[in-house]
Amino acid sequence: MEYELMFLIAEAKKPEFARIKDEIHALVETAGGTWTGNALEFDRKLAYEVKHNWRGTYFVQRFTLPGKDECEETGATTEGAVAEITRQLNLNQEILRYLIVNAAELPPLADFAKQFDKAQREDKKQLKETGEKIDEKLEEALNI
């Protein structure tokens, strides 16, 4: 089955992001998972404070776990693998939040990446326009 893993680390941990990501990759591979597709990494302002942090770095990537047929041969279960990954993520102090979901009905990550890039461009454009309006009002108020 295919799953999607998203986790969030604090902005202060950004220099250690590569190490944390490698640890998570090793954790999923130890549980029998295989990473698929491209990963998304992006920095964002958080909607609310999480453990005294207002900004963070998100990581999103999909992975597969063996199906029922493959699990019967090894004696492992998919639910057990997801439970173990969840347990290890709970123990990791560097991860602020995480989410593992079944990716069967989710759109491709490439679609999300396109939407996210478009939203970022629109935000930058809006900020630029707002800044220009403020500059005009300042010039008008100062009679420049």
Image (tube, grey):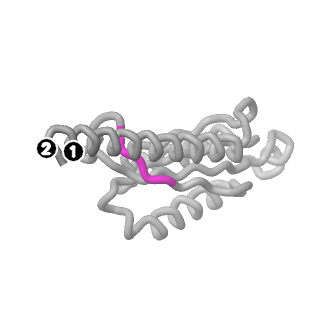
- Residue 102 lies, with reference to residue 74, above or below; the image says above
Does the residue at mark 1 contact the one at mark 2 (Cβ under 8 Å)?
yes
Kind of element beneath mark 2: helix
Crowd tier of the residue under label 1, counting other residues whose Cα lies within 10 Å: few below 14, some 14–19, many 20 or above:
few
Residue 139 badge: 1
Horizontally, residue 122 falls left or right of residue 96, namely right
Kindly identify the residue that appears in the image at 86 percent across and 42 percent down: 69
Residue 97: give its label.
none
> Is 1 located above or below residue 16 in the figure?
above
Instruction: Give the main secondary structure of the magenta stretch.
Output: strand
The Cα–Cα distance between marks 1 and 2, rounded to whole angstroms, is 5 Å
Q: Amino acid at mark 2?
A: Leu
Residue lying at 76% horizontally and 41% vertically, measured from the top left: 1
Q: Which residue is mark 2?
A: 142
Report the side of 93 relative to 37 (left or right). left
Q: Secondary structure at mark 1?
A: helix
The region drawn magenta spans 42-46
